[in-house]
Image: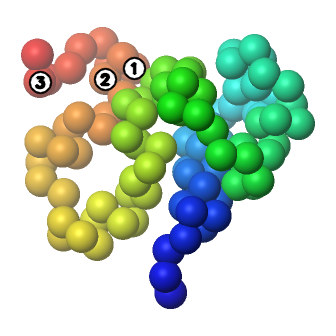
Amino acid sequence: MRDTPKRFVQRVGRRIAELRKARGLTQQDLADRLDMGMSQMQRLERGRHAPTLGTIWRIAKALRVEPVQLFVTPEATAKRLGRPKEETVAREVPWAMVGRSPLK
């Protein structure tokens, strides 16, 4: 199946929702952090509204991820790269919860 701009925007929206849920946030929580309306957040997550680069950056910071993480799904990365290396896994652990990062 060919990718299209519409499908790309939908994929980004699904990824935003996935990351938001993984952090235990509601759509309203994230919308409040971004100073945006609930309806706009819903349109972003459904892929009915393409976010600007500035909005992508703000969403990423609110979710505490790098902006590129909104464009890449974990499944796509795993399929393309094979099994993640130990260093990659170590970076994905929420080190703030354990007090320090082993990579520093």
Residue 14 visible = no
Q: Is residue 65 above or below residue 16?
A: above
Left or right placement of residue 81 versus residue 11 in this view: left
Residue found at x 64% / y 64%: 6
Rounded to the nearest angstrom, the CA distance separating label 1 from label 2 is 5 Å
Q: Nearer the viewer, mark 1 or mark 3?
A: 3
Residue found at x 28% / y 65%: 78
Q: Secondary structure at mark 1?
A: helix
Q: Give percent across and percent down for residue 96.
A: 36, 17
At label 1, counting other C-alpha atoms closer than 10 Å, the crowd grade (few under 14, some 14-19, many 20 or more) is: few
Going from N to C along the chain, the mark reached first, 1 or 3, is: 1
Residues under numbered marks 1 and 2 in contact, where contact means CB atoms less than 8 Å apart? yes
Q: Which residue is denoted by mark 3 in the rendering?
A: 103
Q: Which residue is denoted by mark 2 in the rendering?
A: 95
Residue 97 visible = yes
Residue found at x 36% / y 66%: 76
Q: How many marks?
A: 3
Q: Nearer the viewer, residue 5 or 78?
A: 5
Q: Secondary structure at mark 2?
A: helix
Going from N to C along the chain, the mark reached first, 2 or 3, is: 2
Q: Amino acid at mark 1?
A: Met
Q: Is residue 60 above or below residue 8?
A: above
Picture quadrant where residue 46 is located: bottom right
Rounded to the nearest angstrom, the CA distance separating label 1 from label 3 is 15 Å
Picture quadrant where residue 32 is located: top right
Q: Amino acid at mark 2?
A: Trp
Q: Amino acid at mark 3?
A: Leu
At label 3, counting other C-alpha atoms closer than 10 Å, the crowd grade (few under 14, some 14-19, many 20 or more) is: few
Q: Which residue is denoted by mark 1 in the rendering?
A: 97
Residue found at x 63% / y 38%: 51
